Amino acid sequence: MGTAGHIDHGKTALIKSLTNIDCDTHKEEKLRGITINLGFAHIDLPSGNSIGIIDVPGHKDFVNTMVAGVSSIDFVMLVIAADSGVMPQTVEHLKIMEILGVKKGFVALTKIDLVEEEILQIAEEEISDFTKGTFLQDFPVIKISAKTGEGIGELKEFLQEMCSKVEQRHTGKLFRMFIDRIFSVKGFGTIVNGSVISGHLKKKDSVYLLPVEKKLRIRRMERHGNEVEEITAGDRASLNLVGLNKDDFKRGMSVSDRILQATTMIDAKLTLFQHNRNFKIWTQAVFLLGTYQAQARIHFIDKNLLEPGKTAIVQIHLDSPCIAKYGDRFVIRSSSCDITLGGGEIIDAHPLHHRRRTKKLISELRKVTEGGVSELIAAEVRKRLIPVSYQEIGDILNIPKQNIQEVVSKSLPEDIVVISSKEKGYLMLKKEKEKLEQKVIRNLETFHKRNPFDERGRNFEELMGLFGINRDSTTENMMKLILEEMIDSNKLKKVHHTWALKSHNVILSSENKKQVDFVEDYIQNSGMKTPLISELIPQAKAQDIDENKLKQILNLLTNQGKIYNIEGNFIYSLVVNKCRNVLLKYLSEHKEGIKVSEFRDLVGGNRKICLLMITQFDSEGITVRKGDYRFITEKGRKKFEELED
C-alpha cells in the first residue's frame, strides 16, 4: 500500500497509529515536521497476510520522491484531512496514481476529531465530487482520527478485505527492483531497499547493479523486516549485498538477476494533464521512472501539438542511461521540476531512432499502442534483418514464452513470418526470409555452374557463410528450418550431407564419361605410387581436359568414393582400402604398434604414400599416434571385426 495526499494531512501520523511505526526517521524530518524521504512500515493482519506500507512526501518540492515510492504499489490510501479538504497535492497525487496505472485504493478522511459533523459531511461530498470519474470513485471513504483511534479498527478490517481483492502480480522470469534507499550497517556491509517490480529472486542467486552491470552476491534478504530465502514481485525487500559500496551507487539504479541493456531513447504513449501548457513537436521536460530521473527531450511522432488532456505517441531522448522495459509507467514534470505535466506508458524501450515521421512509422506505432501483444511482437521483429526467437522476444518484453507462442499461433501481421519446429520458434520479416532463400538459390546456382560433374551442393557451414558476422545459434537453428522448408517446397534436395538445387542433375555426355574414365584409370594405374598432378595435367590436356575440368573430375571421383583426396594428393580407393585392412589385422595382433617404416614394408609402398595413408587412418579415428608408433583404437577394433565378419 502506498500513501498519497497533500502535506500535513496526516499520512505519517495515520501509519504510526495503524502500525506503531514512525516513518519519519530522519533528523530534518523531525525538525521541520514534514516527510522528506520515503518511509516504510508494515502491518501483519490476523489472516496471516502482511501489507508493506510506503509513506510518501506530500510537499510539492518532493513529488519526485513520491513518484519513486508509488511506482510499485498494489493499492493506494489517498489521505485527505477533514479540516482542509482537497488541496493542490491531493489533485496532483491522484493524477500521478492514475498515470502510473494504479487501479485500487480508498480515501482516508483524517483529522475528523478537529471538525464538526456539518464540516465532515461537506468534506465527504467534496471527496465524492473529486473522485468521480477516477479509479477511486467506487472505493470507500474511511473516516479516521489518528489521535483518538476512531476508525482504525474499520481501516484494519478494510485492509483485510483488500488483501483478498488485490490480484497476484504477473511475475515473469525477469527480476527487477528499483533501489530507493542504500545504507551501511556495521558488521553486515551495504544494504539496499526497494520494491520488487517483477520476477522472483532466491538468496543463492547472483544479482547485477544496473546500468553499471556490476555483479553482486546476496548475503541476506528480508521482507517486511523478516529474513527470507526468496522475494517476489510486489514485495518490499531489503538485500544485504556483497561487492557493493555506497560509492558505487547513484540514484536511479536498480538490481536485476541478469544484465539488461540500458537505453537513452524510448517510444511511449504520453498523456498531458489538464493545465495551461501545450507541447510542441520538441519539448524539454524531466522524466521520472521509479527512482530514475533525467532531463529529457520529447519528440512528438503523430502530432504537431499536444493539448491538455490529450494523448500522443512520442520518442523520448534521455540524457543518461536508464533501465526500462515495455509497459513501464513514467511521469514527466516541467524542466524546473515544479509542475507535473503528465505521464504515460513505454511501448518500446529500445526503438530505432525516428528521424522522419513517415505515415508508415505512425501507422505501425499506432498499431502497437492499440493492437496489443501481437503488434508489439511484430514491432520487435521489424527492427531486425535477422530472425528472433520466441525466447528472445519474451525476454525483451518480459512476457512468458508460452504467451508469445499463443499470440503467434492466433494472428500476426502479414509482413511477419513464423519459422518453427516442435522445440524452437522464430519470427522474421517476410521480405528478409525471401531474400535469404534467394541468396541460397543463387549461391547453389553458382556452385553447380562451377561444378557441373558434382551431384552434391553446399554443406551447412558453407551456407551459414551467407550470414557473415551475424551468425549465432539463432541464425543456425533458423537456417536449418528454412532449408527443411525449401526441401518440402521442392526448391532444394539433400544430397549426402549437402544441399543442392532440386533441378540439379549430373548427366555426363559420352565425351565426359571418357574423360572421367581416363582420369580414374590414370590414378588406378599409379597403384602404390602417388600420382603427380604436374604429370597428370599435360596428359589430361591431350584428352581436351583443361585444369578447371580436371579439378571437377577429381572432385566427382572423390565424392563417388573412387579416389581419396589426402592433403591434395589423390590415391585410388581400392589401394587405400586394401592397406587399411592389412594394417588393422597387423595392429590387432601386435600390441606393440607399428612404425611408418614397418608399415611401408608391410604393404610394399614408398614412404610418401604410406605417410599419406597413415594420416588418413588417423583422421578416421581407427589409429592413434604415440611417439613414432601407431596403435589401433577401439573404433579401429570394431572396424576390423566388421571386416572379419
Image (cartoon, helix red, strand yellow):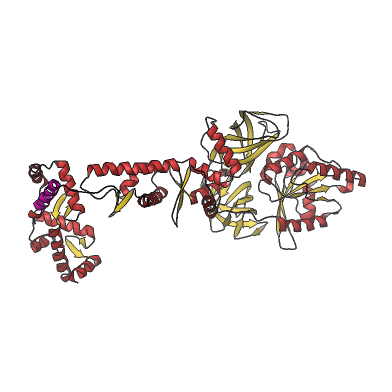
Residue at the spot 57% in from the left edge and 48% down from the top edge: 255
Q: Position of residue 579 (x, y in %)?
A: 13, 62
Q: Nearer the viewer, residue 93 or 23?
A: 93
Q: Nearer the viewer, residue 18 or 410?
A: 410
Q: Nearer the viewer, residue 137 or 158?
A: 137
Over which residues does the magenta segment extend?
504-523
- Judged left or right of residue 332, residue 210 is left
Vertical placement of residue 248 versus 611, above or below: above
Q: Position of residue 321 (x, y in %)?
A: 55, 39
Q: Position of residue 98 (x, y in %)?
A: 70, 43
- Judged left or right of residue 535, residue 82 is right
Vertical placement of residue 211 versus 562, above or below: above
Q: Position of residue 345 (x, y in %)?
A: 62, 41
- Judged left or right of residue 436, residue 401 is right
Magenta stretch holds residue 505: yes
> Is residue 266 in sight in this rendering?
no
- Judged left or right of residue 497, residue 341 is right
Q: Nearer the viewer, residue 96 or 39?
A: 96
Quadrant including the C terminus: bottom left
Overall secondary structure of the magenta section: helix
Magenta stretch holds residue 492: no
Numbered disc total: 0
